[in-house]
Image (cartoon, rainbow, N blue to C red):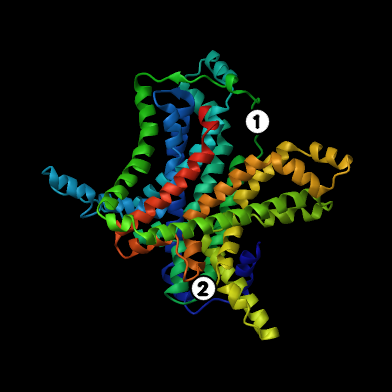
Amino acid sequence: MAIPLLVVLLSLAKGTGETWAHLTRYFLLRYLGNSLVLVGGVGILSTILGVSAAWAVSRYAFPGRELVVKLLYLPLAIPTYIMAYAYVGFLGNGGTLVRIEEMIGLSPSGIDFMNLGGLIWVLALSLYPYVYASCRVAFSGLPASLRSASALLGASGLRYFFTVALPLATPAIVGGVFLVTMEVLNDYGAAKYYGINTFTTGIFRTWTALEDLRSATYLAALLILFVLVAVYLSRLARGRRSFVTQSVSGSECSARIVARGWRQWLVVGAVGTPLFFGLALPLGQLLWWVSGEPAWGISFSLAWVGLQSLLVAIAAAVACLVLALALVFLSRWNQLDVLRPISKLSVIGYAVPGAIIGIGTIGSSQLIVDFFADNYGWRIGYLFYGSSLVLLYAYAFRFLAVAYHPLEAHCLKLGKPLAEAAYLLGDGKLRALRNIELPLLVPAMVSALFLVFVDTLKELPLTLILKPYDLNTLSIAAYTYAEDEQLAKAAPPALLLILLVAIVLWSISFGKEAKR
């Protein structure tokens, strides 16, 4: 599974391309600077939005809280590039805001949103649910004894938040911000549309416009280094501190209080800001566009594109689940400790941007083509090279970690006693797996399937690079129309994509957890 990444690293030995000197002189510092500003700005803003919203719904009781808890997840269903299109359509010159102002007699005030600040705002509103989801679990699990002890020592609610609750939630915050950072580095559609030069857009431009794959590979290698630094910093942020609290049941957690006075307005702002700017505004803009495109909205071509997206996402989810199960259980069954770290090498794809995986996958596919052509004179390699198998292979590498980690965590929770008891009663490993362990893993397997399904449905860079000519997806359809400045026609596929992702997120993220 790590072959695409290894191909990128090994290809560095071929040297730089013809345009590398031009890139390093005029663009490299710009790529680096913009990427750093984006990571820092989006990380800070998404942390503020996610932590404040998580604390508001975990600490305070207010009317409609159960619904708000669910809705705060839904901006994750809106891909970043679709959020970017919606904001330009609403705030830009000739946009919805200008039309509203003209209708009520005000002078038009179109806002230039296609800049670095606008991109930070859009990415943070799309990605803050990563921080919100992890922090809500951390805050909801804090025992009531911590709040009681703080109150006895004279700490106010604000001081309790900053000195007790927030430090204990550090692993959750770091984990959420790490996922946000990976998504920012992977973003292509929003940055390309806003005209912001980042490493990912630079890789695409060098590869396609300049036709210099070697220089694009060197840019990819630098981005891999960027990712490794991010991984190191995420681990450094935690250090060797312990964040263990007493395991508590729901009844032992801190009781929610009714917000009054100025706290009530803070709670409204904490949950209302991301809901309005991250959900209501972009959805409203997309619906406004759809209302003007009724013929396209009900076309059979859109249904066919949606069906292709579903089939590709389902195939990728099943492939990742099978591979994740194999990694988890073959690692448990093997008796050589030196081989166990190999499974970790297979799941590093989620920390690698899609553009890099695309370059590595094409390079490794070309090796297959050359092997059969040079040694046997067969052109069978081209059947693999130009098919959907390459895209599914790349999806498996990119999202294998999404399926692997929930399964591994559930297996660690179950332990080995049940399987070992089955071995003592005469069952083999495969029979014990089929009859005992897999039935107990059904919830984790379902979650893994759905999570990979959602990520595949939203993926843009990898799909742009590797999709066959006769395959189209909702993400590609929305991006293509937006690139041609046909934003109204980009709305129907965007809304259908959001609807599918929202249904999946609603079904896996809520339920019992929403009642905590």
Residue 116 visible: no
Task: Name the kind of residue labelled 1 in the image.
Answer: Val
Tag 2 near tag 1, CB within 8 Å? no
Q: Residue at x 31, y 43 (%)?
A: 281
The N terminus sits in image quarter: bottom right
Q: Residue at x 55, y 31 (%)?
A: 512
Count the marks.
2
Instruction: Give x and y (percent) for residue 182.
Output: 52, 52
Instruction: Give x and y (percent) for residue 97.
Output: 22, 47
Q: Residue furthest left?
A: 105
Q: Residue at x 57, y 71 (%)?
A: 362
Instruction: Give x and y (percent) for residue 493.
Output: 38, 56
Q: Residues within 10 Å of mark 2 (few under 14, many from 20)?
A: many
Q: Residues within 10 Å of mark 1 (few under 14, many from 20)?
A: few
Q: Which one is nearer the viewer's eye here, 199 or 294?
A: 294
Q: Is residue 134 left or right of residue 423?
A: left
Q: Which one is nearer the viewer's eye here, 35 or 255?
A: 255
User: Label 2's element?
Assistant: helix
User: Label 1's element?
Assistant: loop
Mark 2 and mark 1 lie on one chain; the one further toward the N terminus is 2
Residue hosting label 2: 215
Q: Up-down: is 362 above or below 226?
A: below
Task: Name the kind of residue labelled 2 in the image.
Answer: Ser
* Residue 213, label in figure: none
Q: Which one is nearer the viewer's eye here, 320 or 149?
A: 320
Q: Is residue 504 left or right of residue 107?
A: right
Q: Up-down: is 499 above or below 27?
A: above
Q: Which one is nearer the viewer's eye here, 372 or 339?
A: 372
Residue hosting label 1: 244
Q: Residue at x 51, y 23 (%)?
A: 160
